Amino acid sequence: MTASTEDRKKFFGRLFNYANNAITIAGVVLTTISGLLIIVFLSAQLWGGLDNPYIGLFAYVVLPMIFILGLIEIPIGMWRRRRKLIKDGATEEELTDFPRLDFNQPEMRRVATIVLVMTALNAVILGAASFFAVEEMETVEFCGETCHTVMQPEYTAYQDSPHSRVACVDCHIGPGASWFVRSKLDGLRQVWRTAVNTYDRPISSPIHTLRPARETCEQCHWPNKHHGDKLRIFSRYKTDEANSPSYTAMLLRTGGGSLDIGRAGGIHWWHIYSDNRIRYVGDESREDIYWVELTTPDGSVRTYTRDGEGPTAEEIEAEARIMDCVDCHNRPTHTFHVPAKGIDWIIDTHPELRSLPYYKKQAVKAIEGEYESHASGMAAVRDALTEFYTAEYPELAAEQPDLVSRGADLAAQEFGKTVFPSMGTNWETHPNHIGHDDFPGCMRCHDDEMSTAGGEYTIPMDCETCHIFLLEDSKEYPEFAYALEAN
């Protein structure tokens, strides 16, 4: 046996000797298996065969962590093994050449080449896994389905919303690296709270961590455009036997625009930062607003408070917020409808249900009941409607079973979109501040009580400030609406 062959044998023998321990072997096994699985999942992803959020979480988050753990275990085990050999009296000959970085030796060059190739391969695997991990974590399915029970209310409401084709991250994170990093760090906290079962019930709205609407909502919506007045027709139904309709038509002074384009006014112009700027200070939930500052286009500043009492300068500096879209449109996606209005919408879109006596009354009553779980609540609402008509209107139930069944199913679906007992979530836990029918909304400021010092200016409560009634509580659908629909 030549000297070079002998040296090679000793060199690799030592490496295998150091690697002959449980920790290193476990690291090799973990790294090899997880690396192969990552490659398999990456291939499946590229071929379109990976669409389950749980598989994505496992493939791009769990497996890379196991892969890295295995890589760390390998040198730790070898280091511990070497220390043990020295402690046990291993000869100098057994330890010679470790680790001798002599690239004049062909063996070392081969080892170095193998290490470099494996390192490059590991980097490719981890890089690809990290890329797909980020991509996976930004999907709607990951946000809504991975933590199914926790996010069920938000995901259900999202699917039924006008933004159901907008990815969660477009609003909750938006563009840019800083908010991306911030969201992922906050996500670690959320994952931990989910793992140890200490998350809020209901999940609280991210009032203080949500990115300003100027950097998210306004990437699609353009508040500075002048929209003029908007016609709205509201259909409401009574809880009498006939489900009697009531129609209200109004012009909402949506407005918008700016002085630069020559058209300005209305709700959006006054409230969205363009020519005017509004700042306010409220309580933690922003339900109770007690200080408002308006800076007008000419630079004058008006400060409104109740009874002349307001926050200190330090509190204003720390807490004052520039008003934006989500201060009124606070539920643009995750809307939990008040039962009465949810049933109004069902009757409006399924007018045949008006022929079911007391449909609205019974549906609202069933939805507002107490139930142990989401599934049992939906079943109970469906059964309550079916049993009511079977008992009170047996002829109707016998003659029109499909209509009764449809009404019961739609009421159950409305419950399913609104009430989630396990998460303590319903229409009361998530107020909607568009308008002022069911929650304070506009009246948080527009209550005729917030005035400047001396009372020169007051935030008005006059109805016609924001809308003009064209028709109110009419029994008939407005004729002019038919003409508008025809055009």
Image: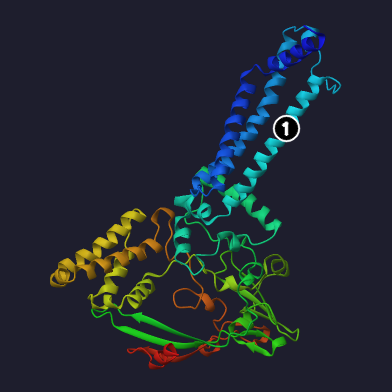
The one of 72 and 285 positioned closer to us in this rendering: 72
Residue 358, image quadrant: bottom left
The one of 245 and 107 positioned closer to us in this rendering: 107
Q: What residue is shown with label 1?
A: 117
Q: Is residue 172 above or below residue 434?
A: above
* Count of all numbered marks drawn on residues in the image: 1
Residue 130: image location, x then y, percent: 64, 45
Q: Amino acid at mark 1?
A: Val
Left or right: 303 in relation to 101:
left
Figure colour scheme: rainbow
Left or right: 478 in relation to 52:
left
Residue 80: image location, x then y, percent: 70, 19
- Residue 319 appears in view: yes
Q: Is residue 44 above or below residue 138?
A: above
Label 1 crowd bin: few (<14), some (14–19), many (20+), radius 10 Å: few
Q: Residue at x 67, y 25 (%)?
A: 74
Residue 421: image location, x then y, percent: 39, 56
Q: Quadrant of the C terminus?
A: bottom left
Residue 424, image quadrant: bottom left
The one of 278 and 16 positioned closer to us in this rendering: 16
Q: Quadrant of the N terminus?
A: top right
Q: Residue at x 60, y 24 (%)?
A: 26
The furthest residue to the left = 395
Kind of element beneath mark 1: helix
Q: Residue at x 65, y 80 (%)?
A: 224
Left or right: 93 in relation to 50:
right
Residue 404: image location, x then y, percent: 23, 69
- Residue 429 appears in view: no
